[in-house]
Each structure stands twice: as structure tokens, then as C-alpha cells.
Amino acid sequence: MIEFHLDRGSGVSTYLQLVHQVKHALRLGTLRPGDKLPTAREVVDSLAINPNTVLKAYRELEREGLVAARPGMGTFVRQAVGGATLADHTRLRRGLEQWVREAAAAGLDQEDLRVLFTAVLADAAKEGVA
């Protein structure tokens, strides 16, 4: 089950942070179709937020077709996001971790990495790769 966390200084609304975390977990394969999301009460208790905020996030995910509410049972994941398998994610993550280590050894900091990665991603999009 996903465990939500908040970055209160991020400037991103709380409900959107919840939505993004569910989508992130779906992309990474840590949430899969059939998995149950925490109840609104569980999220409220762990994060000390308004129940309507959780419900708004869950409604947004439902509107996007990613989850479905089952009255009396909870909210469940309907579909995954992205096309890669968990094995693909694991393999690619290991490669990316190695790349980060090499970049750090070359003297790049986090901002350098972010800029470089964003540039490569933009180039790939122009080429129709990503």
C-alpha cells in the first residue's frame, strides 16, 4: 500500500501532491491494478489534512480512470500508467543509478544532473524517442 507524504513548502496543492504520488507509484509499479489505496481516514490520520482534500485527490484519480471507488470496500487501482514492466523499471533504474554515480564522480551536482537530464529528455522528444 502507498504511504503518502507531503512537502508543505513545495507550493503544490496538497490534493495534487497525493495525485502525483499515486501516479508515480503506478509508473514505478509499486501500485498495480487491484491494489487498494488507503482510506481517506487513514490518510487524514497520517498527514493531518482535511478529509475533503483526500476525497478531491481520489475523485481526480477516478476521473482520469486510474482508480475506482467501491462503496463500503474502498478505492482500488484500475489501471497502470506507462508501458514498461517492473523488470524494465528495475533494470533501467540500476543503469540510471550508475549514471548518477559516474556524473557525481565527474563533479556534477544535483542541479547539473537535473539540467543535463532535462536537456537529453528534450532532445529525445524532438527526435520522437520519448
Image (cartoon, rainbow, N blue to C red):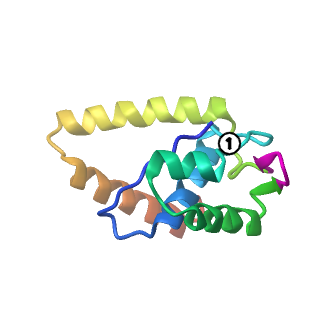
Residue 54 visible in the shown view: yes
Residue in the image at 53% along x and 53% along y:
44
In this view, 24 is above or below 121 = above
Residue type indicated by callout 1: Ala
Q: Which residues are magenta?
A: 70-78
In this view, the residue in front, 7 or 24, is 7
Q: Is residue 9 left or right of residue 124?
A: left
Give residue 63's quadrant in the image.
bottom right
Give residue 53's quadrant in the image.
bottom right
- Asked whether 86 falls inside the magenta stretch, the response is no
Label 1, on which residue?
84
SS class, disc 1: loop
In this view, 36 is above or below 57 = above
Q: Quadrant of the N terminus?
A: top right
In this view, 10 is above or below 105 = below
Q: Position of residue 122 (x, y in %)?
A: 45, 66
